[in-house]
Image (cartoon, rainbow, N blue to C red):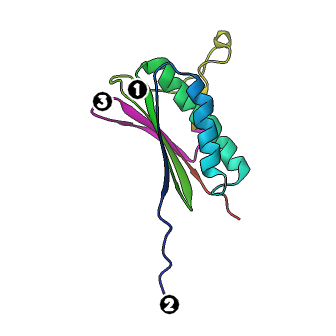
Amino acid sequence: MTKRQESPPMRLHRRLGHADLSAVGEIREALREFLRYRRRPEETEVAELLLSELVTNALIHTRNGAVVTVTSVPTRVRVEVRDFVTGQEPAPYVPNADDGTHGRGLILVQSLADSWGVTTQALGKVVWFELSAAKA
């Protein structure tokens, strides 16, 4: 009996300029294309939503750009958004009624991702989430 070889991870890697909010739509499109034949459409939609929340936060709150890395293996997809500002730990909070549409990004990540977290770096941090592959 031969041991089944696991597929090597596939990666998408992009650097986004600071304050370039048009990059949010562009990275969503790149993610959609990257996951097109790797994930079901509903999984891709969730990944796009969560990615756009993290990228928007990074671009608005850090002003130093961000790096997005997406890793896909058969059992899961991991999305990482790295910024380059130290001392700003993101935390989900429940916005009040006056916040309009702001302040819900990390609550969505917390609710929809199978796992998520923050890893501090020497310069900045990585906010990441993982989505497990749906069972066929």
Number of numbered discs on residues: 3
Q: Nearer the viewer, residue 118 or 40?
A: 40
Q: Which residues are magenta?
A: 110-129
- Secondary structure at numbered mark 1: loop
- Residue 59, horizontal then vertical, whole percent: 49, 23
- Name the residue at the left extreme: 122
Residue at left offset 55%, top offset 51%: 77
Using the numbered discs, state the Cα–Cα distance from disc 2 to disc 1 in whole angstroms: 49 Å
Q: What residue is shown with label 1?
A: 89
Q: What residue is shown with label 3?
A: 123
Using the numbered discs, state the Cα–Cα distance from disc 3 to disc 1 in whole angstroms: 12 Å
Say if the magenta span includes residue 115: yes
Q: Is residue 107 visible?
A: no
Q: Nearer the viewer, residue 31 or 83?
A: 31
Residue at left offset 64%, top offset 47%: 33
Q: What residue is shown with label 2?
A: 1
Compared with 76, 115 (above or below) is above
- Name the residue at the top extreme: 98
